[in-house]
């Protein structure tokens, strides 16, 4: 029994390129498709397009998580073991574990003959959107034995957006999520670590579906497709490369330029979402506090009660490496509690 990607009983989440309804393209971490079905057969068909690192398809079937290695280029078929009788009901979530180190098309699924496709639960009314870097994407999150330490050598195998603080926060809030997160990205073009040596910043990527030039042409996102009540802007950690001017000269010309661009970025988000509450933050990843001071100055200068800053208890000093699962959970608990404390109308 073939299930096509445009079947209305499937439940999608995330910024998805629907240019071809039979081949929706998953780009951002946390992008997913959910399905409920009966039977003892589940086969998944995808097509991958890679830029760097190894790539994996995330899968949660009946609460059990697994990952399937994807080819660098081309189509792949996965037969996912299903336990139980032919009449038993199952639920599966297929999701993007990583950022735009790759993109993949979901080409559909196959069930046993005589199986039934069932309706998915209604999506949560709450919606959040996150703009961030590798921490927001859950990069290297599964290397739990390296908690509080530098990263181990890796090639993408430890990255899992399910364990990002971003998705953890969404689950704690019972909210949908769009996770606009990319490893290495800073705010400004020409800084950070993403797409070296022609570094691309969030100011270019934030309003796109496709944004990695190595994977094809850029494509604008239609903001009418998703309107969050809460936006989390977690940018300001990779901006110290190639020079940590905020630490060295917090009142210098480069620092002032960054603050102007950060303000413009927040104003762009506000123009798209006039009613959303915007939370500005960084993370537990080690960085100089001058960046957080500057973010606070911009927030205060804007004078918008719907734009606030949150400082985590171990902000900027929690780990020299990427956040592992326990540290992401720590962030998610704090952030979810803070958002709940805002008592936002309609959220």
Image (cartoon, grey):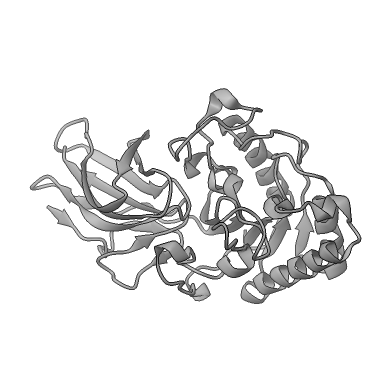
Q: Residue furthest top?
A: 145
Which corner quadrant of the image does residue 272 belong to?
Answer: bottom right
- From the viewer's side, name the closer residue of 274 and 256: 256
Does residue 13 sit above or below 268 in this rendering?
above
Q: How many marks?
A: 0
Left/right of residue 177 with respect to residue 52 in the rendered view = right
Check the picture and name the quadrant holding the C terminus.
Answer: bottom right
- From the viewer's side, name the closer residue of 92 and 283: 283
Residue drawn 88% across the image and 56% down it? 250
Which corner quadrant of the image does residue 150 belong to?
Answer: top right
Q: Residue furthest right?
A: 251
Residue drawn 14% across the image and 37% down it? 86
Residue drawn 70% across the image and 50% down it? 237
Asked if one can make out residue 274 in the rendered structure from this viewpoint, the answer is: no
Question: Residue 206, percent across and down?
Answer: 58, 66
Residue drawn 57% across the image and 59% down it? 197
Q: Residue furthest left?
A: 113
Question: Residue 218, percent across and down?
Answer: 46, 72
Left/right of residue 196 with respect to residue 238 in the rendered view = left
- From the viewer's side, name the closer residue of 33 and 97: 97
Does residue 60 sit above or below 246 in this rendering?
above
- From the viewer's side, name the closer residue of 25 and 244: 244
Question: Residue 110, percent across and down?
Answer: 17, 50
Asked if one can make out residue 252 in the rendered structure from this viewpoint, the answer is: yes
Question: Residue 130, percent across and down?
Answer: 60, 56
């Amino acid at each position: 029994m073939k299930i096509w990607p445009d079947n209305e009983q499937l439940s999608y989440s995330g910024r998805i390129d629907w240019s071809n309804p039979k081949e929706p393209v998953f780009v951002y971490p946390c992008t997913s498709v959910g399905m409920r079905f009966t039977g003892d057969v589940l086969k998944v068909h995808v097509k991958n397009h890679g830029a760097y690192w190894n790539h994996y398809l995330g899968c949660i079937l009946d609460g059990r998580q697994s990952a399937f290695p994807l080819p660098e280029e081309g189509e792949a078929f996965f037969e996912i073991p299903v336990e139980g009788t032919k009449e038993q009901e199952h639920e599966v979530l297929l999701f993007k574990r990583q950022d735009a180190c790759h993109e993949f098309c979901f080409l559909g699924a196959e069930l046993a003959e005589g199986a039934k496709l069932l309706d998915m639960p209604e999506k949560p009314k709450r919606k959040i959107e996150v703009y961030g870097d590798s921490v927001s994407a859950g990069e290297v999150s599964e290397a739990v034995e390296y908690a509080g330490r530098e990263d181990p050598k890796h090639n993408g195998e430890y990255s899992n957006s399910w364990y990002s603080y971003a998705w953890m926060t969404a689950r704690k809030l019972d909210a949908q999520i769009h996770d606009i997160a990319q490893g290495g990205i800073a705010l400004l073009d020409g800084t950070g670590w993403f797409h070296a040596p022609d570094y691309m910043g969030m100011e270019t990527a934030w309003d796109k579906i496709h944004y990695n030039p190595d994977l094809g042409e850029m494509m604008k996102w239609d903001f009418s497709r998703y309107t969050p009540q809460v936006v989390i802007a977690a940018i300001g950690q990779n901006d110290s490369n190639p020079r940590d001017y905020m630490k060295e000269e917090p009142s210098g010309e480069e620092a002032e330029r960054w603050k102007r661009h950060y303000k413009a970025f927040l104003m762009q988000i506000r123009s798209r979402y006039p009613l959303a509450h915007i939370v500005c933050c960084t993370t537990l990843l080690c960085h100089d506090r001058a960046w957080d001071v500057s973010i606070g100055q911009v927030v205060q200068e804007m004078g918008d009660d719907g734009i606030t800053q949150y400082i985590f208890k171990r902000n900027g000093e929690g780990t020299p490496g990427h956040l592992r699962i326990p540290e992401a959970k720590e962030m998610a608990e704090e952030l979810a509690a803070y958002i709940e404390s805002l008592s936002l109308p309609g959220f």
